[in-house]
Amino acid sequence: MAWFTKTRATTDASEKRTLGLGVFRRCDECGVTLKAEEFTENLEVCPSCGHHYALSTEAWVELLLDPGSFDEHDTGLVSGDPLLFNDSKPYSDRVRATRKKTGADDAMMIGSGTVEGRPVQLGSFVFRFMGGSMGSVVGEKIARMFERAADLRQPAILLSSSGGARMQEGILSLMQMAKTVSALGRLRDAGMPFVSVLLHPTTGGVAASFALLGDVNIAEPKALIGFAGPRVIENTIRQKLPEGFQRSEFLLEHGMVDIIAPRREMRATIARVLGHLVG
Amino acid sequence: MAHLEFEKPIVELEDRIRELKLYGVREHGFESELRKLEERVSTMQQEIYDGLGVWQKVQLSRHPDRPYFLDYLERIFDDFVELHGDRAYSDDAAIVSGMARLDGRTVAVIGHQKGRTTKEKLRRNFGMAHPEGYRKAMRIMEMAHRFRRPVLTFIDTPGAYPGIGAEERGQSEAIGASLLAMSRLRVPVIATVIGEGGSGGALALGVANRVLMLQFATYSVITPEGCASILWRDGTRAADAAVQLKLLANNAVDLGVVDEVVPEPAGGAHRDPDDAARLLGVALRRHLGELSQHDGAALIDGRYAKFRAMGVTQQLT
Ligand SMILES: [Zn+2]
């Protein structure tokens, strides 16, 4: 058990957008104001315009896996501070504070479970933990997830939502790209599929490693998915980017993702894909 | 010749020596003055080069006269046949690839290439590859794998290009696929960071059995400028960010990412490209000799174990 009391934070974007006494909530996208629970009951998707707001890691696990089937692995794995990185605050302090605040060990949760009775290995970024950035812990857990899936001959499902590599772990965070993708190679050798689920946003070193290497890539509607962030591109080319650039629909059009699945259909979509590829 | 600020005193003295020699040292009885100048240059070099700060080393890695991939290629290898194109979209001049001989033995060589002149810089896109560059690299690697030829890569890029076309054609997928392809090669793979090792665009050529780094090269997850603008919203604090990022060759060795630092001539590779190439050639031959003892499965397993071990975590009980 961790030294701190583990409290799974269930807060996400929804809470911040809650108006008044947590009764009403306004959709930033279409402007409609509805009862807060209408968003929550609709899996954080706006009932009026269909805009997908972030869903917590824990809620995703509940949504995708058969009830009670999830068994979390490798808890208590936390990051070191190999660079002794210090901007305004030492990295080690920042990590400790983030762990306390989020109730998560780091930005990745992995475990095993079943999808419609089929055993799978599942991983999900914890975006609320430093923007889902990938450092040593994230890389290690993803590598273990792929290795476990290969050893047990089970499919791997990984939900990505990340701003990319974790700068504060420097070159070691870059190397997690090579480490995770190498482990994915083991899964391929085992003949088991990798379903990559791309959530908003998936960019940088996470996009440029395993996230677009799924046997099947499934994106949520309008998720931002790309190598370079839009601001970096705008600064480089000195022009405004076209509407919809780097969004899921753009990636589908350019041949980078297989399917765009709304949240309500994600579980069934994954299950159907696995049904075609396994067993 | 272009000079960095800290190089100026040395270059000025060297110019003076050259002038004296041109003017005729013996005829005019300048022997003792020449000797004094040469001694001063030598002490000055030692003082300046030994005292280089992190940011000055970053500047050396980007020195406009620094040897690029093709400068090493022509000095170390023979019989280079350049192979162009990704067979899907175009030929990316930011990455040069082909087959060449090292002591008579064919190897695949692949590297980022920056330009020297303005025109060439633009043609090579400052060494920033598009997806087709990585896909070309992958094509050559896979061919080397089939014909059982070792793969030698040379890394020198500020990063993969962040642009509209690059995103449309799948920069992310191209880099990821290159990492995967490299991890599965059944032949010896040696990567050398010769200048700037910038982020994913660098690592895309870096999944190797041996990773070498020139003494004044850098290898980083983000440019110091990019890091500074994220941390402090101030890109001009790049020198501070560079210190935090631990991006020098000795840092990379300490962190277990790089196997060996290849020494450069005093003051940096640009001061003596021939000697820099000689030193790199020595290191490449030694590592290639060692790796050639292993069979394909051992090479794949060794590469896997190497990258699998990278990272620092702790398990709370
Ligand atoms: Zn709405």
Image: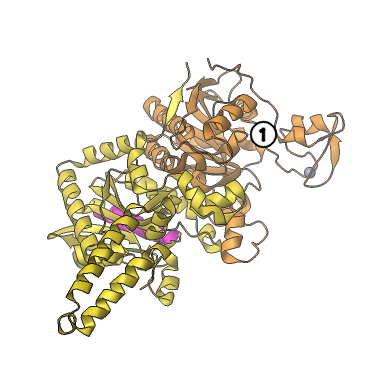
Give the overall secondary structure of the magenta segment.
helix
Q: Which residue is mark 1?
A: A55
Ligand 1 quadrant?
Answer: top right
Q: Pick the residue in front: A195 or B228.
A: B228
Q: For residue B29, which quarter of the picture? A: bottom left
Q: Is the CB–ligand 1 distance for label 1 below 8 Å?
A: no
User: Chain A takes which shade in the image?
Assistant: orange
Number of marks in picture: 1
Magenta stretch? B131-144
Q: Is residue B2 left or right of residue B229?
A: left
Q: Nearer the viewer, residue A200 or A271?
A: A200
Q: Is residue B73 visible?
A: no
Tell me: B282 left or right of B237: left
Residue at (54, 17) in percent of width and height: A2
Residue B253 horizontal/vertical position (percent): 32, 42
Q: Position of residue B184 (x, y in %)?
A: 31, 44
Q: Name the foreground residue: B181 vs B31.
A: B31
Q: Position of residue B183 (x, y in %)?
A: 33, 43
The residue positioned 44% from the left and 62% from the top of the image is B128
Chain with yellow colouring = B
Query: Which residue extends farthest left?
Result: B104
Q: Amino acid type of disc 1?
A: Leu
Whether residue A229 appears in this view of the structure is: yes
- Magenta span has B142? yes
Few, some or many C-alpha atoms within 10 Å of disc 1 (few <14, some 14-19, many ≥20)? many
Left or right: A147 with respect to B261? right
Identify the residue at image location x=86%, y=39%. A33
Q: Which image quarter holds the N terminus of chain B?
A: bottom left
